[in-house]
Image: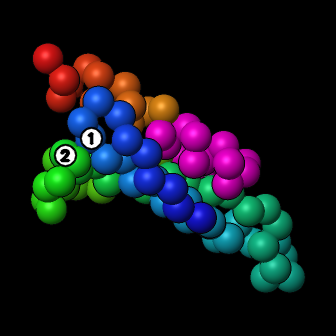
Amino acid sequence: MSQTYHHRGFEIAVAVESDLSRKGASGVPVSVGYRAIVITNRIGAAVAVFSPLRFGESRSKLFTSENDALMSGYSAERRVVDDLLVP
């Protein structure tokens, strides 16, 4: 799942990646988690402002749904744009 948003002259592309790495004794995944990968560009520019940022991996706390990862990645990156990139 992926989505592109526009915010204050920037394009924020959020992709959601699933993680099936937690497996039970039988080798079958016991839970699915999701992380958000975010790329930010100035609108019209081909080069990203930052390297892709990954949200949802701190202390193995993945997001529990794709929508949660998508919206959390967008919200976090919107704060980055507001705090660091827009005067």
Q: Residue at x 26, y 20 (%)?
A: 83
Element class at badge 2: strand
Measuring from the top left, give residue 32's x and y in whole percent.
Answer: 74, 62
Magenta span: predominant SS is helix
Q: Is residue 73 left or right of residue 38?
A: right
Label 2 packing within 10 angstroms: few (<14), some (14-19), many (20+): some
Q: Is residue 30 above or below residue 85?
A: below
Q: Label 2 amino acid?
A: Arg
Q: Label 1 amino acid?
A: Phe
Front-lying residue, 6 or 22: 6
Element class at badge 1: strand
Residue position marked by numbered label 1 in the rendering: 10
Measuring from the top left, give residue 17's x and y in whole percent.
Answer: 55, 64
Occupied quadrant, residue 34: bottom right
Occupied quadrant, residue 18: bottom right
Magenta highlight range: 56-74
Front-lying residue, 20 or 4: 4
Measuring from the top left, give residue 42's x and y in whole percent.
Answer: 19, 45
Occupied quadrant, residue 1: bottom right
Measuring from the top left, give residue 35's x and y in whole percent.
Answer: 55, 54
